[in-house]
Every structure is written in structure tokens, then in C-alpha cells.
Image (spheres, helix red, strand yellow):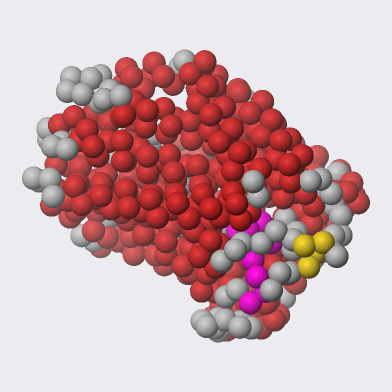
């Protein structure tokens, strides 16, 4: 019986899991959403979403990974029945399709860290031109994409303990430290109080706005990685007695804390250093431009900005890289479940990610299309996790897989949430996104080759679904039933 790879300590697993969850969306999307949708009200709903969607799904994922000791493909086959193997295939495919362009985004963070070290953000710099010149330079994008995916490959090549666990024990504490430093500097700027009020003072009228609820739940789903299959993959390497509820709640609160720190670093800076309120509010409308244009342009106006800028972009780089490691590891685990060695699997996944990420590196419009399509598909992945729990038996999971040995016991409310609340949230959030998207483009929403159309989502989803269902028997046969022995 073979020994399986295993996290050396609980701290190592928690660090890796928090690194998996905390990504660029915490830093550039959360502040924007919180500012636009009610400040403190958005934060409260965002925390509520952790309990009604993200944490329950993370617990189910961890239960599947620990029980089956396989990634999503083999995990779904062994947790349910062979005919549902394609659902695990969907999770792997969607995560890798995101990885192809997320490596490019990680490269952006690396580029801006280098620019900050070089002192590029000096008074008078045109950050919009700087960003657009870089974004539309394919060779630079490919170079930094290769740098990001290559670094990720070297880490994963070393294995769980010497690679993933070791690097996350360094990067995750450093990430939080850099965010704290940036947040402290931001809130001490003259005029920062307006930004803090904008972030934390509740606009109670926003409670009646469905968009506040839907955006908060969407942010939580994407930010924590619930339903991606990432925690399922990391759970393969946990010990038998690891506390599922406690670990998942730590991951969820760690992710939320990073988002709040990022909000405290970004929003007060925007409001303190912008020439007027209208400019500050306008800066919060653009997703990527918020950090690469607006904030980059404000650092030169900040006392100590030459120090804060490298720390901020290094925090972004660590957030992106720690998430990228988890995404690549999911693909590596899938190939290892097919009987490949870690070294062979890592080499194959890194090469595939680099080659299939080239279109996103060369053509920004292609990257935006893929982000639009597969970011939405993560909600479907979450639904497969809910469906798996219901078919296996939610109460059975709670009693046999979640609660034994746990310090925090999940009660009947947990079962009720997964049976009724989580499916309802999926239907409402997904339905709302499609309704909104059709409303934005009523004439050509159906077009399958338009960057941000409903048609391109449905076309690419259907194509992937058909391929996976046709390959289901192949996936069942190819995934090995390996016997692995736990290390005590």
C-alpha cells in the first residue's frame, strides 16, 4: 500500500487553504462592490453569505476529498456513482479554463510589483497609458505569464510538504502583513475618514435593493473558492482527524478578513487622495483599473508611497500566486488519479496552461470573454457540490463525515441550508445574472461569439457539457482506484 502525500501540519493546510481562497478578487473586486452596494450593509450580507453558501459548500468539498482521497473526477465517481463522474470532470475543466487566463493576471501583478520596485509610480506618470501599453503588448504579457506559471510549476513539482505547504506558510502571513501595513497607512491619510465611512457605515436603504444581496453572495462564492474543487483537492492531503467545520470556517473568515483589509487599504486611499468626491466614486467603477490605473496614480501623491506601492503589489502577487498554485494542483491531482507521477503530471499541466493561456496573454478581449464565461460556470460547479450532498444524503454527511471529531458541531440548520437554502440561492443568483446580462444587450444577447453575451456563455457551457458526458465512461475507467495509506 502506497503512502500518500500529506500536509505536515494543520497550520500548513490552513495556510494553503486560505491562500487558495484569497485572490485578486479580494483586493480589486471586494472594495468596489462594498463601496457601490451599501458599505456596511454589503459587508453584513457578505458575512451572511459565508454561512448560507460558502462555508457549507467548503465543508462538503472537504468531506468528499477526505473520504475518497481523490480529486474531483475520482471523488465524484466514488462519492456518488460512476454515471456522475462527469460532474467532477466539469469542475476540473472549468478550474483549468480559468487557470489559463488567471496565470496571465498573476503575471500582471508581477509586472506591477517590478514597476513599483523600479519607482515607475512617480509624480506626473500617466498610469492609464502605462497600463494600456502593457496590456496590449503581447510579448510582455507572455513573458510574465510564463514567469507566473513557471514559478507555480516549480513549487508544485516539489510536492505538498516541500512545495505547497512550505511556500504558503511564507506567502499567506506575508500577504496579511502587507495588507495590514497598507491599510494602516491608508486610514492615517488626511481625509481617509470619508472612505472608512463609505466602507463601513451602513446604508440601510440598500437592504431593499436585490443587487446588494446578489452581489454580496456572488462575491462570497467567487472569493472563497466554494464549489471550485480546490478545497476538495487539498483535503486529499489532510489527516483523518482534521476538524472539517473549524478548518472551513477559519478559511472563510480568513478570506473575509483579507477582503476587509483590502477594502481598508483601497477605499480610504481613493477618497483621501482624489481631487474631489466625483473622481473618487468614478475610480471605484472600474474593476482592474481600480488598482492598475487609479491606485497606481495615487501612490506618488501619498507620503511613503514609494514604500507602500511595492508592498501593495507584492500582496496582490502573493494573493494571485497562492490561488494559482491551488488551481494548478487541482489539474495535477486529476492526472495523478489517472496513475501519473507528480513530476509528469506537473510538467504536463504547466505546459498545457502556458500554451492554452497564450490567447489570453495576446488578446485582452479573449481573456475578458473567458473570465465572463467560466467565472459564471463556477456557480454551476457549486451546484454540483450541492447535488452531490443531496444524493449522498446531507444528514448522513453531517453525522458521519462532518461532525465526528469536530469541536464545532453542525446542527440540523446545516442540513436545512444545504437541502433548501443553497439550491434557492443558486437559482436566484444565476437567474439574476442571466436576466441582467440579457438586459444589458437585448438585441444581441444570444450571439455565441460576442465577448460578454449570454449566448457565448450558453454555447461554451453546452460544448463542454456534451464533451464531458460523452467522455464519462472513459473518465470512469481511466481514474484509478488507488490504495493509499494515511501517515499517522
Q: Is residue 93 visible?
A: no
Look at the picture and state if 348 lies above or below 222.
above
Q: Is residue 466 left or right of residue 210?
A: right
Q: Position of residue 176 (x, y in %)?
A: 36, 53
Q: Quadrant of the N terminus?
A: bottom right
Query: From this viewpoint, which residue is outermost toward the left?
Result: 190
- For residue 92: magenta? no
Look at the image and tell me whether residue 257 can be seen.
yes
Asked whether residue 237 is drawn in magenta, I would say yes
In magenta, the rendered stretch is 229-241
* Residue 377 drawn above or below residue 358: below
Give the x, y percent position of residue 91. 68, 50
Task: Count how many numbered circles sit on residues in the image.
Answer: 0
Residue shown at 85% from the left, 60% from the top: 482
- Taking the image as shown, residue 177 lies to the left or right of residue 434, namely left
Residue 132 is situated, as x and y percent measured from the top left of the image, at: 38, 19
Q: Residue at x 23, y 37 (%)?
A: 307
Q: Is residue 417 above or below residue 382?
A: below
Q: Position of residue 384 (x, y in %)?
A: 68, 58
Residue at 48% of width from left, 69% of height from top? 249
What residue is rendered at 31% in x and 36% in y? 310
308 or 397: nearer the viewer? 308
Describe residue 75's horizontal placement relative to residue 426 as left or right: right
Amino acid at each position: 500500500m502506497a503512502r500518500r502525500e500529506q500536509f505536515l501540519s494543520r497550520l500548513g493546510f490552513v495556510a494553503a487553504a486560505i491562500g487558495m481562497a484569497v485572490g485578486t478578487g479580494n483586493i480589486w473586486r471586494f472594495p468596489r462592490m462594498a463601496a457601490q452596494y451599501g458599505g456596511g450593509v454589503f459587508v453584513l450580507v457578505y458575512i451572511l453569505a459565508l454561512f448560507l453558501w460558502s462555508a457549507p459548500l467548503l465543508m462538503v468539498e472537504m468531506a468528499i476529498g477526505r473520504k475518497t482521497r481523490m480529486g474531483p473526477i475520482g471523488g465524484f465517481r466514488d462519492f456518488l456513482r460512476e454515471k456522475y463522474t462527469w460532474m467532477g470532470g466539469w469542475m476540473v475543466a472549468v478550474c483549468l479554463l480559468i487557470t489559463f487566463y488567471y496565470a496571465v493576471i498573476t503575471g500582471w501583478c508581477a509586472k506591477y510589483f517590478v514597476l513599483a520596485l523600479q519607482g515607475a509610480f512617480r509624480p506626473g506618470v500617466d498610469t492609464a497609458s502605462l497600463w494600456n501599453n502593457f496590456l496590449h503588448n503581447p510579448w510582455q504579457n507572455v513573458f510574465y505569464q510564463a514567469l507566473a506559471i513557471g514559478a507555480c510549476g516549480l513549487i508544485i513539482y516539489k510536492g505538498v510538504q516541500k512545495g505547497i505547504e512550505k511556500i504558503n506558510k511564507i506567502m499567506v502571513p506575508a500577504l496579511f502583513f502587507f495588507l495590514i501595513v497598507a491599510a494602516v497607512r491608508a486610514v492615517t491619510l488626511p481625509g481617509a475618514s470619508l472612505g472608512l465611512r463609505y466602507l463601513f457605515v451602513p446604508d440601510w436603504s440598500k437592504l431593499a435593493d436585490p443587487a446588494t444581496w446578489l452581489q454580496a453572495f456572488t462575491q462570497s462564492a467567487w472569493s472563497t473558492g466554494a464549489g471550485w474543487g480546490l478545497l476538495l483537492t487539498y483535503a486529499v492531503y489532510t489527516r483523518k482527524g482534521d476538524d472539517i467545520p473549524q478548518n472551513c470556517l477559519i478559511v472563510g473568515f480568513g478570506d473575509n478578513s483579507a477582503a476587509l483589509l483590502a477594502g481598508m487599504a483601497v477605499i480610504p486611499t481613493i477618497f483621501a487622495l482624489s481631487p474631489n468626491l466625483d473622481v473618487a466614486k468614478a475610480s471605484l467603477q472600474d474593476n482592474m483599473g481600480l488598482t492598475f490605473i487609479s491606485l497606481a496614480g495615487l501612490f506618488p501623491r501619498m507620503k511613503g508611497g514609494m514604500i507602500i506601492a511595492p508592498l501593495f503589489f507584492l500582496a496582490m502577487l502573493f494573493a494571485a500566486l497562492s490561488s494559482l498554485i491551488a488551481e494548478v494542483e487541482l489539474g495535477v491531482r486529476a492526472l495523478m488519479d489517472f496513475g501519473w507521477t507528480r513530476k509528469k503530471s506537473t510538467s504536463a499541466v504547466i505546459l498545457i496552461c502556458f500554451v492554452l493561456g497564450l490567447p489570453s496573454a495576446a488578446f485582452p478581449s479573449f481573456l475578458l470573454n473567458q473570465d465572463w464565461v467560466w467565472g459564471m460556470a463556477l456557480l454551476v460547479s457549486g451546484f454540483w457540490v450541492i447535488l452531490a450532498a443531496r444524493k449522498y444524503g446531507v444528514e448522513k454527511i453531517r453525522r458521519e463525515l462532518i461532525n465526528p471529531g469536530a469541536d464545532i458541531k453542525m446542527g440540523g440548520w446545516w442540513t436545512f441550508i444545504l437541502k433548501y437554502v443553497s439550491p434557492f440561492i443558486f437559482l436566484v443568483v444565476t437567474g439574476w445574472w442571466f436576466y441582467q446580462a440579457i438586459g444589458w444587450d437585448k438585441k444581441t444577447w444570444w450571439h455565441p461569439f460576442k465577448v460578454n453575451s449570454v449566448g457565448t456563455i450558453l454555447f461554451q457551457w453546452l460544448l463542454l457539457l456534451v464533451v464531458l458526458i460523452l467522455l464519462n465512461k472513459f473518465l470512469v475507467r481511466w481514474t484509478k482506484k488507488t490504495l493509499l495509506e494515511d501517515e499517522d
